[in-house]
Image (tube, rainbow, N blue to C red):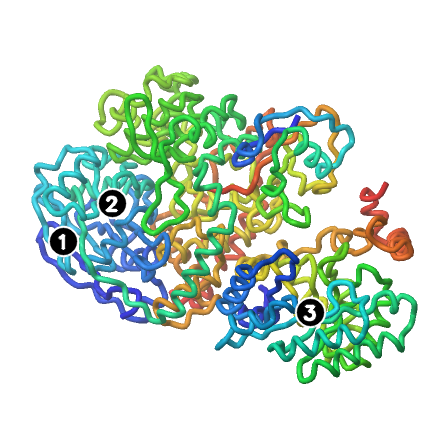
Amino acid sequence: MIDLDRATLVKMIDHTELNAHSGEKKIANLCSEARSFGFYAVCINGGYTRYAKEQLEGSAVLVCTVAGFPLGAGTSSAKAFEAAEAVRNGSAEVDMVVNVGALRDKKHDFVRADIRAVVEASRPALVKVILETCYLTDEEIVAGCKLAVEGGAKFVKTSTGFGPFGAFPDHVRLMRQTVGPDIGVKASGGIRNFKDAWRLIQAGASRLGLSSSVGVVEGLSLYKFAPAAWLEEEIPCHICPARFANLDKQPKAVYAYYKKKCLACPNLETYNRYYE
Amino acid sequence: MNGWMGKIVKLDLGTGVQEIVEVGDETRRRYIGGRGLGVKLYADLCSAATDPFADGNALIFMTGPLTGTLMTSGRYQVVSRSPLTGTICDSSSGGTFGAVLKAAGLDGLIVTGRAPTPVYLSVHDGEVDVRDASALWGLDTQQTQKAVQAELSAKASVACIGPAGENRILFAAIMNDKDRAAGRGGMGAIMGAKNLKAIAASGGASVAIADPAGYKDVASRLDRMVDKNPVTGKSLQVLGTSVLVNIINAHGMFPTENFRRGVFNDAEGTSGEKIAESLLQRQSACYKCPIGCGRTTRTKDMSGEGPEYETVWAFGAHLGISDLTAITEANYACNELGLDTITMGSTIGCAMELCETGAWTAGLRWGEAGKLREWVTDTAYRRGIGADLALGSKRLAARCGRPDLAMQVKGMELPAYDPRGAQGMALSYATSNRGGCHMRAYMIAPEILGHPVFLDRFSTAGKAELVALFQDVSAVVDSAVLCRFLQFAVGISSFAEMLRTVIGLDFSDEELMTTGRRIYTLERLFNNRAGFGRGDDTLPPRFFNEEFQTGSSRHRRVRLDEMLDDYYAVRGWDKSGAPLPRTLAELGL
Amino acid sequence: MVKFYGLLRRHVPKAAVEIAADGLTVLALLRKAEEEAGGAFLDELLDRERGLLTGTIILVNGENIRLGQGLETRVGAGDRVDLFSPAGGG
């Protein structure tokens, strides 16, 4: 039996709608669902912060706005401005994207300062740093986490949801190990059902960014008393980021990093049918 | 009182005496309503020695606290001891009757005794009137409903029997709201034995809701979940349940010619897709139901409701018949006469095999579509071979010296899924409390349809736990009372929330699961006392000894021995299938 | 041979279509089938990330691909593929 109740699960969810093409009706619907289910926050683009705040008037649901999203490659002052404006408009949390290029270049001081700028500009709101794990090696993920904490962020987050892949238990585990128990770990991107969500929670996620929030919550209902067989580990490759490495969509070095990992994996013998 | 109306009437048709049955808060909480409360009250009033046709037998019509509130809440349950199987039996029917019975002021009605001459009941404002039905006796179910409405009110909802019930056919159904059926187990025969032709209800009482704001939330959420879900939001509406024909056939487990084969050559011709493009006039829905799985159809000469999946199979592949018109018209006949289509079709299939093997000389042959309607009608009136078919497959096959050819468990005929194609389904059939029923634990959902997860249908691992889980959840839904199809869209926590907002009692998910388990175990206890045990938790020999040679379920046999002991262990029963003392203590039984 | 059932038939002109499949994965085959059968049915079977929807049934020679390599299962010439979008009943 899964020892998680619905009340706890809903408070772990940022109900998300970040598509470029989403109109007001979608945001209104998002807010109404969040109210109805009792989600922790709605996660939206800056242009809708004020609207969402109005829609959520009188409820306990928070507004979370993204900044420097989805690329993270803008200037620090632009990101800071976005964050400050979002907070003025009613946001309680800001999800910023780290400067991925600088992180990969090992310009750590720059990355830290970039994060700090957003943290300062966002006070009293809390900041989450999106690492965009699909473009990073494990070493870079660890570095990113440390810099986020040093910069004053309260959460590290896996993905924007717009990259080649999203959250994986391995990455979440690594992030949790790095930041320890007091910093939040938000898993986002590609979480489609309760099973996916449960794996990430078990790996250490304390918040989930979902657009399929309703399905995930209902899924708890279906899995709660389910026999262990239902939640069995899939073929490990199915939930391993290395399998989703994509030369078209990722930097060559990152792709090569994952492929190397794959070839050195002890599971390769058993599951090698996945590879040419 | 929130949810429940707080009134259950017991009426003795022999003496005419009526009394209010008091149900304490504790009992309501522990059994909820519908099937649960019905089974509890039945077990208190009668015993495992009660003859289903005896005057002393009780026939219970029960609604639940959610009846008349949320979507699909027009359903009701009929509980008694089945004359077909001898087990405890609850039969479920859709439509509106449940909601109207409640609007008429009652949670439930218990009928005992036997009226000296045919009567029908009229329920209104919490009162039950006994009225003369001599002019109705002999009418079919459609005529009966119209006649009662003409006498009482066009708005009355009527549950009634037809000639089959009057003639105490062991698988006679109770029909309501035109073509909805409490089909399995022969509840209609009990009504006939009591000389009770119909029950009509009408009224305007509303159900009190404990938390109106919370209820509104839950209702709109349910709306959204049901609409979003591809099964409840699209598939069932457009194609009805017969969409399963091609699916089950492609899996090589569409029982053909009395379960001798698993692939039917002309499955396509009897499929939901075919119905949609040929006979379908429009979909139909029960009380407050957005799913609308019902099919309003017409053939060249007739019209009516259905057929749905089970019927399309029972009169189709099971008999080697691919004539959709003949199948549909036989379905109409069952609706009019008040007969369970599954048992009817299955018995005919058994008869065909008995004739083929020479065990019977009645001359029935596979594929004889032209005679279907005639056989059905003759069964209702016990005419000609109808008198033999009226025995049901178990008794007929036994009489012909080939009991192995009856595809039944505990006397109830198996429905449209061959268990060699899904091991979990095999266990489900074997351990169902009312006999060969697919609804107690619908293992087809995970094993074939992949809902809510996909499981390997040929594996026996983990199936015991799952069957028990599904049996318990289903018992809850049957006690609420809501439609099982909601289970494609929402899970136990949602049902707990529905009950909380309507009744105002603090049901947790765990408590609800325990309630389901309690109901299931009480049914089992009753069956144990009636003489059922491990030996009856089995399947006909065909499934252990014969294999299909073609189709994707070929070369498979049921491996019940790998699952049954596990199942008993999960249930907390001993090796003979009897609940252990600690299990009874845990459940307060 | 790819066969369409149920609601999928609303999207394609013919219930069965012959596709040259030798060695293609099921996912690639579905994409090709969409082109050749002339109807957009993928959304009935797959989610936005092109994973199988809960309830989608795809059989290759009668066996469910979820028991094989899922959408990566390879289809050979002469194989029969049955496609069912999520459905249910009783």
Q: Which residue is mark 3?
A: A66
Q: Is residue B338 left or right of residue C39?
A: left
The amino acid sitting under disc 2 is Pro
Callout 1: chain: B
Q: Secondary structure at mark 1?
A: strand
Q: Which residue is mark 1?
A: B12
Callout 3: chain: A
- Tell me which numbered mark, 2 or 1, is placed earlier along the sequence: 1
Q: How far, Cα to Cα, is label 2 from label 3?
A: 68 Å
Work out whether A93 lies above or below B228: below
Instruction: Quarter of the image for the C terminus of chain B: give it.
Output: bottom left
Q: Identify the residue shown where x is 88% and y is 68%.
A: A102
Of residues B110 and A197, the one nearer the viewer is A197
Q: Are marks 2 and 1 in contact (CB under 8 Å)?
A: no
Percent position (x, y) of residue B332? 30, 30
The amino acid sitting under disc 1 is Asp
Q: Nearer the viewer, mark 3 or mark 1?
A: 3
Work out whether A255 lies above or below A41: above
Percent position (x, y) of residue A30? 55, 63
Work out whether B18 lies above or below B368: below
To the question of a shared chain for discs 3 and 1, the answer is: no
The answer to whether any part of residue B394 appears in the image is no
The amino acid sitting under disc 3 is Val
Percent position (x, y) of residue A83? 70, 76
Q: Mark 2 packing: few (<14 Cα in 10 Å), some, or many (20+)?
A: many
Callout 2: chain: B
Of residues A30 and C73, the one nearer the viewer is A30
Q: Identify the residue shown where x is 52% and y is 41%.
A: C87
Q: Which residue is mark 2?
A: B52
Percent position (x, y) of residue B381? 21, 27
To the question of a shared chain for discs 2 and 1, the answer is: yes
